[in-house]
Image (cartoon, rainbow, N blue to C red):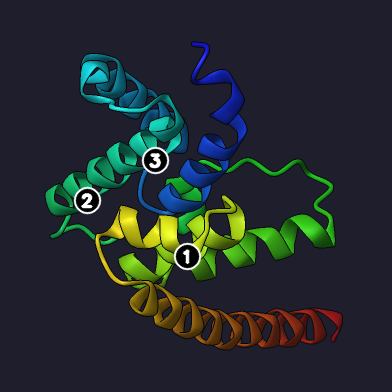
């Protein structure tokens, strides 16, 4: 618990963003913590505990994605179980659109952008987690930002069209 408490918020943010549309983030956190407890003796350095948790969560999601490879989730909001109160604000809507757009990225791009932008990992740390070069991570970040801009612009255009149609 001494190792977990300082990293809880970052781990929760990572799980929320990474599991969006595919898995309940609380289940992911729980499963990752159970595995971490079972394999705790394999942790070599206390400073690497957050990396240890992220690696476990990434593997759990990959295993789950393999199991669900034949299924398609049509409604991301329903699958995510993300409950918004009745008085949605613009900010919550934008966050929801962002998470939906992130969920549509390829897995490595999704992980890179979440680890870098949401969880605050360095490019070097991400490269270690993904077992790739720093240049590959940088390229994934560039591509994921470009694709997110494209997806978010597309989503906002659809929202504006729906709003103007509703006013008629």
**Would you say residue 73 is visible in this rendering?**
no
| Tag 3 near tag 1, CB within 8 Å | no
What label sits on residue 123 in the rendered view? 1
What count of labels does the image hold?
3
4 sits left or right of 22 in the view: right
Q: Of the residues under marks 3 and 1, which one precedes in the sequence?
A: 3
Instruction: Give the quadrant of residue 48.
Output: top left
Residue pictured at 38% horizontal, 72% vertical: 134
Instruction: Report the residue marked by disc 3.
Output: 51
Q: In the image, is residue 76 above or below residue 51?
A: below
- SS for callout 3: helix
68 sits left or right of 22 in the view: left
Residue 8, position in %: x, y? Answer: 56, 28
Q: In the image, is residue 121 above or below residue 56?
A: below
Residue 132, position in %: x, y? Answer: 26, 67
- SS for callout 1: helix
């Amino acid at each position: 618990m001494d190792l977990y408490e300082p990293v809880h918020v970052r781990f929760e943010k990572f799980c929320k963003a990474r599991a969006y549309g595919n898995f309940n983030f609380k289940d992911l956190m729980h499963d990752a913590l159970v595995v971490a407890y079972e394999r705790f003796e394999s942790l070599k350095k206390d400073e690497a505990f957050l990396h240890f948790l992220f690696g476990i969560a990434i593997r759990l999601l990959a295993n789950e994605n393999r199991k669900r490879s034949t299924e398609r989730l049509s409604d991301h909001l329903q699958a995510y179980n993300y409950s918004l109160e009745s008085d949605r604000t613009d900010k919550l809507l934008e966050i929801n659109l962002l998470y939906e757009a992130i969920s549509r990225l390829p897995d490595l791009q999704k992980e890179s952008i979440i680890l870098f932008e949401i969880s605050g990992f360095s490019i070097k740390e991400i490269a270690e987690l993904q077992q790739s070069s720093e240049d590959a991570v940088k390229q994934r970040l560039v591509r994921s930002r470009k694709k997110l801009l494209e997806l978010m612009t597309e989503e906002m255009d659809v929202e504006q069209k729906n709003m103007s149609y509703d006013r008629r």
